[in-house]
Each structure stands twice: as structure tokens, then as C-alpha cells.
Image: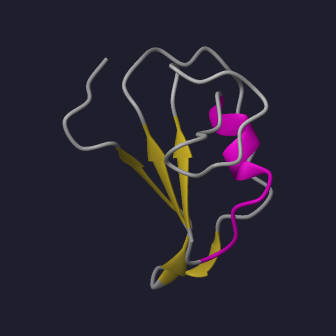
Amino acid sequence: MDYYVSKKCKAPGEGILEKSFATIKEAVQIARPGDKIIIGGGLYREWVNPIMGGNCDADRITYINKQGETI
């Protein structure tokens, strides 16, 4: 599953493109191995403590920037 995070959105979000999470912390609380967290441009000043990281390199949670967006 893909979860979206954007500084342009307000909490609470749903993690979908149209209603992104406002914080990375919201996404890591529900992400599971194999999921992708797509982070929009901006400065995120938050402490993130992922509940899960993954099972192995092939089955892990990945964090990537949203294409075309920067800080």
C-alpha cells in the first residue's frame, strides 16, 4: 500500500493522495512491511519512531520523496 504525506494537508488525513497525512508520524503508525510512504516537499520537524521496519531487504517499508517536489 502507498501512503502519502504532505505539508499542504491538515490532520487528520487518510494517507491517500487526495487526503494525505500531514505528518510522517501518522504514516509510520500504520505502515507495514511492503508499504511505501511517499513524502511531499517541505520541512518536517518531527520525531519519527517507526513501529515496524520490515522483515528483510525485499519486504520492508520504504520512504521516498514525491516526484517533482523538493524542500
Q: Residue at x 59, y 24 (%)?
A: 9
Residue 28, given in percent of the width and then of the height, sits at: 70, 50
Up/down of 3 relative to 9, above or below? below
Residue 33, given in percent of the width and then of the height, sits at: 63, 76
**How many marks on residues?**
0
Extreme residue toward the left, this view: 68
Say which quadrant the N terminus sits in. Answer: bottom right
Colouring style: secondary structure
Up/down of 56 relative to 9, above or below? below
Query: In the picture provided, is 62 more to the left or to the right than 28?
Result: left
Q: Residue at x 33, y 42 (%)?
A: 66
Residue 59 or residue 65, whichever sits in front: 65
Residue 35, quarter of picture: bottom right
Residue 48, quarter of picture: top right
What residue span does the magenta drawing correspond to? Answer: 23-33
Say which quadrant the C terminus sits in. Answer: top left
Q: Is residue 52 magenta?
A: no
Q: Residue at x 66, y 30 (%)?
A: 23
Up/down of 33 relative to 5, above or below? below
Residue 63, given in percent of the width and then of the height, sits at: 46, 52
Residue 52 or residue 22, whichever sits in front: 22
Residue 71 or residue 16, whichever sits in front: 16
Residue 41, given in percent of the width and then of the height, sits at: 36, 25
